[in-house]
Amino acid sequence: MRSTLALALLPLVRAINIVSSNDDGWAEANIRSIYNALTSGGHSVVLSAPAENKSGSGSRDETPSDRTEPCEFDSCPANSGPYGFNETDTRLNWVNSYPVTSIKYGIETLSPQFFDGPPDLAVSGPNVGNNLGLTVYLSGTVGAATYAASTGGIPAIAFSGESGTATAWNAETPTYSTVYSELAAKLTDRLVASGTPYLPENIWLNVNFPAVDETCASADAFSFVLSRIFTAVPLVTPDDVETCDGTRLPTESSVVDTDGCYVSVSVGTADDKGDADATSQGVVLEKLGDLLTCLP
Ligand SMILES: *[C@@H]1O[C@H](CO)[C@@H](O)[C@H](O)[C@H]1NC(C)=O
Ligand SMILES: *[C@@H]1O[C@H](CO)[C@@H](O)[C@H](O)[C@H]1NC(C)=O
């Protein structure tokens, strides 16, 4: 009774259809944590991620081949074909290929089955380890998000976190993994509450979480800061959106390196993985509203 009432009083966040991928593999703890966080937040989520660790594979895309080995952490048997899923939760899917191939399968094949159409949003990660600046070109987690936002035409967010190491889905869930997923769900819900389109066309968000430690121990301790992916070139790079008393956003690296618990939120163009212009940054600034703060 009490929980029904509490639910009824929550601000209305529309439940949406979300496709989820990563590059650390379908059975890594972080992707299962975000699946649980978004699902318990009311969203309908389908996970479609590589059968094994495909870190560093950027935007590679190849037709899935038959697996001969078991999936990572023994999460599927050997010789189980090019695709597979968890028999008790068929929303959990693996693809024996790269992150881009996996999210593409999620968008083109699984979404029509589960959602009766395309997903409303694509999320990738949380990646084990940050993807800051130039690493966006190498990261498969970023590759999946940028594919979704460009070719897929689906608003997309890549999440990456500094803390942790590769952890199996059936190990005890590490605290950092829970914290990162709560933060990811918080940002997702804010974007959803801002209404459609959730992001401008061809735009993705690169979100990086600093370490979870004694100071930054729970999701409530963190703030979000609008940032840039790359360092601006003086006199060459056009102004960023005006916020926090300036027209130059901090780089995402400087945000996560600032003492305190600051999450960087960069607005990127998906076709070339560059920084978006001030207009698109401004759209995101407005959508995220008071979720965003300024660096001290
Ligand atoms: C499959 O899902 C069940 C039920 O949620 C869970 O107990 C099991 O650990 C999962 N296995 C894998 C490999 O995802
Ligand atoms: C994947 O491999 C990279 C290096 O190739 C490593 O840093 C990372 O921890 C691995 N992740 C998993 C889930 O095994």
Image (spheres, helix red, strand yellow):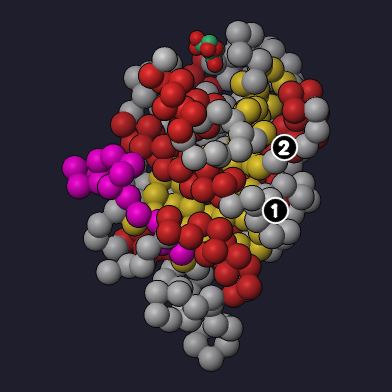
Q: Which mark is residue 119?
A: 2
Residue depicted at 51% across the width and 57% down the height = 288
Q: Which residue is mark 1?
A: 197
* Quadrant in which residue 294 is drawn: bottom left
Report the side of 258 relative to 231 (left or right).
left
Along the line of sight, the residue nearer the viewer: 294 or 63: 294
Along the line of sight, the residue nearer the viewer: 285 or 252: 285
Report the side of 205 relative to 100 (left or right).
left
Q: Position of residue 14 (x, y in %)?
A: 61, 38
The amino acid marked with disc number 2 is Pro
Asked if residue 213 lies in the magenta stretch, the reply is: yes
SS assignment at label 1: loop
Q: Where is the C terminus found, in terms of image quarters?
A: bottom left
Q: Which mark is residue 118?
A: none
The amino acid marked with disc number 1 is Pro
Residue depicted at 42% across the width and 27% down the height = 6
Q: Where is the N terminus found, in terms of image quarters?
A: top left
Residue depicted at 43% across the width and 55% down the height = 291
- Which residues lie in the magenta part? 212-226
Report the side of 217 relative to 13 (left or right).
left
Q: Position of residue 150 (x, y in %)?
A: 74, 54
Q: CA distance from mark 2 to mark 1?
A: 13 Å
